[in-house]
Structure formats: structure tokens, C-alpha cells
Image (tube, coloured by chain):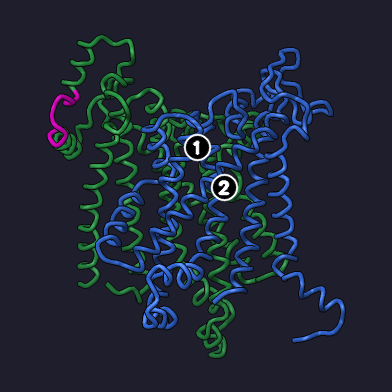
Amino acid sequence: MNQLNYAVKRVLQIVPVLLMVTILIFLMIHMIPGDPARLILGEKATNSAVAALRAKLGLDQSLPAQYFLYLKGLLTLDLGTSLTYQRPVTELLLVSLPITVSLTLISTVFSILVSFPLGFFAGMRKDQAGDQAVRVTALAAIAMPSFWVALLLMLLFGVKLQWFPVGGWGETPTEHLKSLVLPAFTQSLMTSALLIRNIRNSVVDISVMDYVDFARSKGLSNGAVKYRHILRNALISTVTLLAMRMAYMLGGSVIIETVFSLPGLGKLMVDSIFGRDYAVVQSLVFLFAFMVLVINLLTDLLYSCLDPRVKF
Amino acid sequence: MITNTPSGHLKRRIPPWLATPAFVAGTLIVLVALVWALFPSWFTSYDPIAVDTSVRCVPPSMTHLFGTDNFGRDVFARVVYGTGIDLKIGLLGTLIPLVFGSVLGMFAGYYGGVFDSLLMRAIDILMAFPFTILVIVIMTILGQGLQNVYIALWLVGWIAYARLVRGEVLVLKNAEFIQAAQVAGFTDARILLRHLLPNVVSSAIVFAASDVVLCMLTGASMSFLGLGVQLPTPEWGAILNEGRSYISYAWWITFFPGLCLAITGVGFSLLGDGLTDFLRTKGR
């Protein structure tokens, strides 16, 4: 019951934050110097065309009235029309969303698969050669620019070896999956490195705790101590970091998708910024913020399940 | 412990954190980058923006260490001359948020009240946006250009420091030495500056060392997307972006600036790790 109460409370906490997010995003277009309608249509547009667009976008109304119009649009999923593509923004987002979500999820899976064993391995061998090797590799991975790694992987596995497509999204599900391998690997590099550091340090800290000594002196097998007592506790703090990284990787899609020409939310964002398609930009920023809030919510709920000490 | 052997004296003069190979390597890398940034003309006689169509896309050789690009410009010269901008983005992008964020966090943590709640709510809202998205949105509002990259990094960067320092102050606020200072009737300014600041600043500085790498990478990626430094100014991210279309037959245009970014990043990380060890052994 307590858990359910907490969940409801936590969901309700999102509402005010989400409202403030919408206000910020709404004001964004007004913070760009100049008349938004003029910006969209360009310098050469006639005054009457600008006035017509102003009326169409509701820019001739007062700010609060415009905001409520915007909010109403968000709630009814009517996000306006893209000026570049001449299609409803909602439609564009629905096409791009699955691509970015799969990219982020596959990157997350890659990071977990790499970092959990390596971090644990390094932590159990503190300051030995294996630990040093893992730490140095992680250090280098954190400093490498993702767009550079992306280009090198593209050159090696796309152009030279031709194992994976150089870019694009393909037609069939197999092609989709193949075109996500290199981008997801690139995205996961920095996340894996950060997770490895975190897990390694937690394992090192936990290994010297009294309850681990106690478990050993109780006569538990080495494996039981390692996996049930050390690894499990080391993973708790990692969940928070993983959630933060998932949010970061959503944003990182802007760069990765541009390099690999993946038609996801990130690429749509860059294209829309250069095309001054502000209706699309606004909706994208909202969608990104919404996804981050959902990730944070799920993490908090998961956290309370993982660590019974967390009281609500 | 007093040791009389000469080697004992020598050892004590060099603190152990300074003598680790990792810290020495980090310092050397950062120093080399600094010298490149300050005196680029010592290292190359080529002009980083002079076009020479007779030597387009020439692979690396003794005359052109990093090869030439599609305009026949020497890539090594462009990389060396670009060092300054990237270092400046990393250092300035970190320093200003470090100062402002720490001050805000310290005030919020120490005084609490309305200011604290307002600041924390503002942070909650800003944290709802992924980091890169927030930077790009600010760049969209302000417009393209190097100056706006700094502003975007400043507007986003302070959040981490404010949260970090506020958390530390909340813990220390009730420590005995602070209560003693309050009972002794010291002014708030004195307590904040002399007693709290030295104790909370070390974790902020440790974070700043890794933040330099993040700022450098973010700045370079803005140029890479075409939002930051504008052509033909040499900057590592911008050079990479230019070389992108030629990667299948002139890999050197993209390879070397990225490598320099990565190595400089490793340098700052190693420096930061050494600093962490130093501050840890020194304090508290």
C-alpha cells in the first residue's frame, strides 16, 4: 500500500514540472530575436504573407491566450504543421520516435552487457594489472568525441569491411537492426565507461564492508558472497547513473543520428533548427523533456523496489 | 615519522599524488596543448586558412604531417591553430559555472528558505531537458557562433555545481565548527568564505576537472553540427565536420583533430584523477 501511495505521489509530482517545461518551451520562440513569422518565412516575404502566418499561428493574440492555445494543442496532440514537410508535426514525431527509442534502448543494453562484467572484474582485482587495464580503457573512452568514433567506425565497418550500412535506416526490420548496431555502439561507449568506473568503485568500497566479512566468516561460498552480497549492492547506485545516462543519450541522438543519417528525433531536431521549422523544434524539445521525466519516474519506482531501505 | 636517509627527505618533498605516472602524463599532455594554443607559429610555418589547390587531399607526409584537406590547407597547421579555441571552450566553459554555481549552491544551502526552494525548482525544470538538447535550444535562441557556445555552456553548466555544493553545505551547516563560528558571533560572510567555502569547494573542483572534458566535447560537437565556430576558423570539431564528406578517401582530415580532442581529454581526466587523490588525502 505504501508503495502504491509513493507511486501516485511521485506521478503527481511530475505535473508542475511538466507545466513549467511547457511555459519555457512556449516562451522559447518568443526569445528568438525578431518576429517569429518573419523568421520562418525569411527576409524576402511580403508583409501580407507574414501577417497571414501570424494569424495562422495565433501570434496576433495576447501571450497568455497564445500559451493556452499551445497547451490545448499539446493535450489534444495537435502540434501544428511542419513548414518544411507540410505535414502534421504529430505524424513526423510518430515516425521518428521509434528510431530514437530503439537506439537509446539498444545503447543501454550494450552498455549494461559491457560494463557490468568489466566493472565487477576490475573492482574485485583492485590495483592489479586487470583493474589498471580496464580503468585506462574507460578513461580513454570517456574522452573520445562520439562523432569522431562514429566516423571511424563508419569508415572501418561500413566503407572498408562493409559489414554494416554506412548510414540510413533501411526498409526491413533486419536492415533497421543492422543500421542501429554502429550508432548504438558509439552511443554506448561513454556510458559503458562511466558505468564501469561507478561499478568498480562501488565494488571496491563494498568489499571491505563488515557484512561482507560476516558473510564470509559464516562460511558462505566465494560465489555467493561475490554475487549475492557484493554485486547486488554495487548495482543499486548504478541504476541512478544509468537513468541519467539514458537521458543524456536521448540528447546525444542529435549528434549520432546526424552522423549516421538515421531519421530519428535527433536528426529531425537538427534539420528543423536549420530549416527554422520552429513548430517541430518546440514539439521535439517537449517530447525529449517528457521522456526524461518518464525515465526518472521509472527509476525512482525501481529504486524503491531494489533497495528496501528507501522509505517513502 | 622522521627518516634520516637522504632518499627519505627527497620522497617527502614530492607528494605521492604528484609522482604517479598517470598524473605526470596528464600534466604533460595539458602543458603541450597549452603551448600549442599559446604559440602555434612555433610548430608550423603553414597558414591555417590559406587555400592551395595544388595540394588538395594529400596524405600525411614529412611536408604535411597530418596531410592536407580538400582546399589544400595543411591539417596539422589547422589542428595546432585550433587548439586555442578548444582549450578556451573547455576552460572558460567550466570556470564560470564553477564560480557562479558554487556561490548559488552555497547561499541556497546555508540560508535555505524561499531562495533555496526557488533555485531547486528551477533546477528540477532545467534537468528535465537532456544536456545536449538544452545546449542546442539555447544556441537556437541566441544564434550560431563561438560566443554563443560559451553562453550556452554557462547557462547549462552551473546546475551541476549548485546541486553539488548545496548538498555539501547542507551536511556541513550543522557541523560543530560552523556552530562554534556562529556562537562566536562571526559574520555570515566570514563563515561562508573562511569556514564553509574551503570545505565544500574540493568536490566542486574535482567535478570541474571532468567537466572540462565534457565542455570541450560539447563545444566541438556544436561546431560539428554547424552551430558553433563558423568556417574557415580552425577548431577541432569544425575541421572534423569539414572532413566528414571526404572520409572515404581522405581519412586524415577527420582522424587527427578527433585524436587531439581525445588525447587532450585524457590529459585533463588524468590531471583530475591526480587532483582527486590529492584533495582526498589532504582533507577532512
Amino acid type of the residue tagged 2 in the rendering: Leu
What is the chain letter for disc 2? B
What is the chain letter for disc 1? A
Viewer-proximal residue among B257 and B110: B110
Return the residue found at the far bottom.
Answer: A218
User: In screen coordinates, is A264 left or right of B24?
Assistant: left
Residue positioned 42% across, 55% down in the render: B101
- Please give the label number shown on residue B222: none
Return the residue found at the far right.
Answer: B6
Residue A46, image x and y in percent? 25, 9
Q: Quadrant of the N terminus of chain B?
A: bottom right
Does B99 sit above or below residue A217? above
Residue under label 2: B91
Q: Secondary structure beneath disc 1? A: helix
Q: Residues within 10 Å of mark 1 (few under 14, many from 20)?
A: many
Q: Which chain is green?
A: A
Residue under label 1: A256
Q: Colour of chain B?
A: blue
Q: Residues within 10 Å of mark 2 (few under 14, many from 20)?
A: some
User: In screen coordinates, is A297 left or right of B16?
Assistant: left
Q: Which stretch is magenta? A: A57-65
Residue B243, image x and y in percent? 62, 26
Amino acid type of the residue tagged 1 in the rendering: Ile
User: In screen coordinates, is A229 left or right of B126?
Assistant: right
Examine the rendering and report whether any part of residue A259 can be seen: no
Q: Is residue B54 magenta?
A: no
Residue positioned 21% across, 52% down in the render: A15
Q: Quadrant of the C terminus of chain B?
A: bottom right
